[in-house]
């Protein structure tokens, strides 16, 4: 049996290569995943069958202790995430038992200091947060907790920050993930995002939307929300990004809630 996959292997061959004995060999799995990444990069809208997705998830679970393997798995799953019509596309390859989300969360927990894994992991969760069928899995898998850690650990990284804030905004409107967001006490962190990235409208937009959604929650900690100079911080972000349409909706809505409480 070959230990390294052929450079001409197809997507199906690369996945099949990881079945059996090769799935226990990190070097073999790495070569297969590298080939899959090349294929995904060359072809748009490439999709795997349910059986192929199950194979990837099973091997990812089995290789958790190998950082290089996990890094590539996260990149592969992130490359499979659609940039348009996420709702329909994600359903096509999401294992019905939520194991893909579990794998992503496990990798993020295991390699908390790996910026690459955190960047791709937070982006995968951001995409999944837009799909109703995923919210229950996100709530039970610890996805909110790893997002919160990534935001705190890499607060100056614009990609991670934007991924986390966007996912919080999407998850805050769902009852499955509602409690986890409240329990994570993210208000000071989101305030920090507005200060650190005040000149980046996309990040300010998602942070303000997340804060606004949290302010509407029944269990919102209003003392926490009104502390830390939040009014000044929100007002400044709004003034700097005055030409951004969504910010001009979220910022006044949040300020109105702050002043009314």
Image: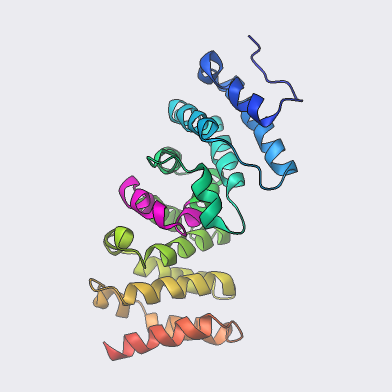
Q: Is residue 118 visible?
A: no
Q: Quadrant of residue 69?
A: top right
Position of residue 115 relative to residue 73, above or below, is below
Q: Quadrant of residue 108?
A: top left
Quadrant where the C terminus lies? bottom left
Indicate yes or no whether the magenta region holds residue 131.
Answer: yes
Residue 123 percent across, percent down from the top left: 53, 53
Q: Is residue 207 above or below residue 139?
A: below
260 vs 182: above or below: below
Magenta stretch: helix, strand or loop mostly: helix
Looking at the image, which residue sits at the far top? 1
The percent position of residue 217, horizontal first and vertical second, equals 28, 73
**Which residue in the rendered view is the most extreme toward the left?**
219
> Can you give x and y, in whole percent of width and height, for residue 104 in the image?
45, 42
Taking the spot 30% from the left edge, 63% from the top edge, the residue there is: 175
What residue is shown at x 54% (from left), y 69% (from top)? 203
* Residue 96 visible (yes or no): yes
At horizontal 36% and vertical 89% (from top left) the residue drawn is: 256
Q: Please name the residue shown 44% across and 25% down the image.
A: 62
Quadrant of the rendering where the N terminus is positioned: top right
Q: Is residue 244 left or right of residue 188?
A: right
- Is residue 45 on the magenta stretch? no
State the image quarter where residue 16 is shown.
top right
Horizontal side of 218 relative to 68 (left or right) equals: left
Q: Is residue 16 left or right of residue 24?
A: right
- Would residue 54 be found to the left or right of residue 181 on screen? right
The segment highlighted magenta reads 125-144
Q: Position of residue 143 (x, y in %)?
A: 38, 50
């Amino acid at each position: 049996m070959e230990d390294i996959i052929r450079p001409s292997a197809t997507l199906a061959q690369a996945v099949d290569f990881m079945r059996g004995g090769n799935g226990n060999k990190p070097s073999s799995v790495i070569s297969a995943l590298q080939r899959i990444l090349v294929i995904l990069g060359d072809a748009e809208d490439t999709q795997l069958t349910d059986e192929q997705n199950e194979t990837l998830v099973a091997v990812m679970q089995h290789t958790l202790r190998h950082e290089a393997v996990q890094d590539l798995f996260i990149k592969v799953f992130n490359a499979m995430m659609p940039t348009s019509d996420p709702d329909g596309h994600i359903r096509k390859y999401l294992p019905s038992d939520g194991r893909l989300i579990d794998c992503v969360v496990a990798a993020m927990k295991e390699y908390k200091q790996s910026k690459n894994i955190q960047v791709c992991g937070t982006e995968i969760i951001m995409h999944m947060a837009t799909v109703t069928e995923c919210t229950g899995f996100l709530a039970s898998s610890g996805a909110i907790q790893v997002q919160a850690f990534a935001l705190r650990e890499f607060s100056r990284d614009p990609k991670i920050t934007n991924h986390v804030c966007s996912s919080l905004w999407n998850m805050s409107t769902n009852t499955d993930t509602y409690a986890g967001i409240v329990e994570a006490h993210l208000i000071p962190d989101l305030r920090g995002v507005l200060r650190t990235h005040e000149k980046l409208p996309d990040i300010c937009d998602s942070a303000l939307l997340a804060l606004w959604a949290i302010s509407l929650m029944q269990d919102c900690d209003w003392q926490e929300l009104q502390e830390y100079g939040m009014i000044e911080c929100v007002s400044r972000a709004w003034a700097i990004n005055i030409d951004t349409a969504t910010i001009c909706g979220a910022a006044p809505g949040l300020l109105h809630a702050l002043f009314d409480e």
